[in-house]
Image: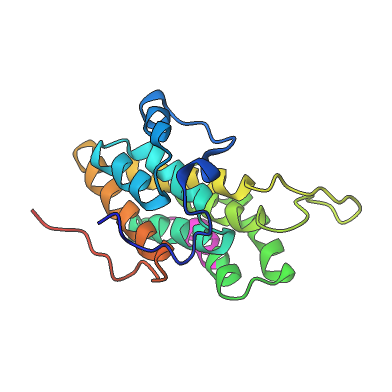
Amino acid sequence: MTDITFTKIKPTHALEICQGLELDEPATALLQDNPTTAAYLHQLIALKLYPDAVRFLAYALPNREATWWACLCARNGLTDKTPANEIKAIELAEAWVYKPTEDNRKLTLPAADAATYKNPASWAAIAAFWSGDDISPVPEAVVPPDKKLYAKAVTGAVMLAATQGEANKVSDKYQLFLQQGINIASGGDGRAVQQSTP
């Protein structure tokens, strides 16, 4: 399974991606042998180091693909009781993924704010906003983002999506979301990956 080619991830070895990335000690120890990107991700998943696997994949993916992943994970938890502002946040983030214009990107900030950062939808929207060259909320000032700031928002979206709801389903959700992320990294859209039923 580690011979998968990640067409959307440029670095071929995990160490290149992990520069400046905070990982737990067991995940850091796996880097000693300088594994390939795919091998490292699969090791993290096999050892059930899911939060580290999410962080790693969020940092490895380019901003559009990572934001799309966040949107997929956020959509997974939608119900008929989901507030309209959360649905709108996802829709606007997706609109930026489909057409990454400045106009589309700027719409994601108020949507993220409206969703109050307590749910995956809000973090998916801010991932889109943080993917631009200027993250200032006002036109008079230009504030360039940290290069991988979007990845922090994606990590937040995926982890919230995995951990909200029933505690006994957290592991299954992490596995589903990581397989979706792997599919996206391999050039797919992540939608074909389905939750396995016991």
For this rendering, which residue is in front, 125 or 35? 35
Residue 89 percent coordinates (x, y):
54, 59
For this rendering, which residue is in front, 138 or 155? 155
The residue sitting at 78% across, 51% down in the picture is 137
**Residue 117 visible in image:** no
The residue sitting at 39% across, 66% down in the picture is 186
Residue 108 percent coordinates (x, y):
64, 60
* Relative height, residue 2 to residue 156 (above, below): below
The outermost residue toward the right is 140
For this rendering, which residue is in front, 72 or 21? 21
Q: Is residue 137 left or right of residue 187?
A: right
Q: Quadrant of the N terminus?
A: bottom left
Q: Is residue 37 left or right of residue 103?
A: left
Specify the quadrant of the image occupied by residue 79: bottom left
The residue sitting at 71% across, 58% down in the picture is 132
* Relative height, residue 163 to residue 189 (above, below): above
Main secondary structure of the magenta stretch: helix
Q: Is residue 35 magenta?
A: no
Magenta-colored span = 83-91
The outermost residue toward the front is 33
**Residue 7 visible in image:** yes
Residue 98 percent coordinates (x, y):
56, 75
Residue 38 percent coordinates (x, y):
37, 52
